[in-house]
Image (spheres, grey):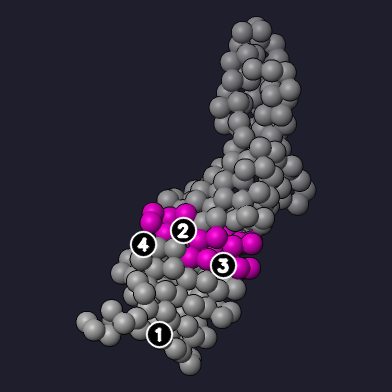
Amino acid sequence: MTDNFIIINYYIYIVLHNDIFYMIISSVVSYSRFQFFLFLLFINFFCSGSISSTGNIEIKADIFELDNNKNIVAASGNVVVTQYDVKVLGKHGRYNQKTQNVYLYDGVKIEKGDMTMTCEEVVAYGKEEKMDATGKVKFFLKDITGTAEKAEYDIKLKKIRLTGNPQVQKDKDTLSGNTIWIYLDTGKLITKGRARIILSESSVKK
């Protein structure tokens, strides 16, 4: 473990757990070098490149920049945000410790089970367990693929609402409309407003 690595972890712990830190350090400074080393290992265990909140959100990244006054954590480099079994990846992101909202941008990818979605940026509402993905959204789920400008993902209800010229293809059939809902459990598709479906020859013969 290098000195630089210890300092980085030490700083993260000070910002995230300010009150606890001062209570612990005051009881450690008078101890032996070995005991202080154990203290540093304790910090490293909790703060090595990741941040967790009470809302079951974990963030991993190469670099964290912390603003304790605004309760904002900026992350960059291989950012990975995990909530339950949903994982969001991107190059850059910001996390608000008060609202538990996460904003990721630049090469964003969302993964949950068999479902994968890519977009330019996403806002994840940690307390509400919802996500808004925008910009060149692409959706993949088994035999279903879709595109749109925006996707609203409700994690609890396991459904995705596509808007902004949405188009979904299932097998060889293509569905387009103003709004398309995709139910992840069943693969069911529902449209609202004027819609259009193109059935493949194989579907017509069935």
On the picture, is 142 further left or further right than 179?
Answer: left
Q: Residue at x 63, y 55 (%)?
A: 107
Q: Amino acid at mark 2?
A: Thr
Q: Quadrant of residue 35?
A: top right
Q: Where residue 142 is drawn, which disc sits there?
A: 4
Contact (Cβ within 8 Å) of mark 3 with mark 1: no
Q: Is residue 103 above or below residue 67?
A: below
Q: Earlier in the sequence, mark 1 or mark 2?
A: 2
Tell me the quadrant of the picture where the C terminus can be found: bottom left
Callout 3 crowding tier (Cα within 10 Å): few <14, some 14–19, many ≥20 = many
| Residue on which disc 3 sits | 137
Nearest to the observer: residue 65 or residue 164:
164
Marks 4 and 1, Cα distance to the nearest angstrom? 20 Å
Q: Earlier in the sequence, mark 3 or mark 1?
A: 3
Marks 3 and 1, Cα distance to the nearest angstrom? 21 Å
Q: Position of residue 3 (x, y in %)?
A: 72, 18
Q: Amino acid at mark 1?
A: Ile
Q: Earlier in the sequence, mark 3 or mark 4?
A: 3
Marks 3 and 2, Cα distance to the nearest angstrom? 11 Å
On the picture, is 69 further left or further right than 141?
Answer: right
Outermost residue toward the front? 201
Marks 1 and 2, Cα distance to the nearest angstrom? 24 Å
Q: Is residue 202 visible?
A: yes
Q: Earlier in the sequence, mark 4 or mark 2?
A: 2
| Residue on which disc 1 sits | 198
Q: Quadrant of residue 104?
A: bottom right
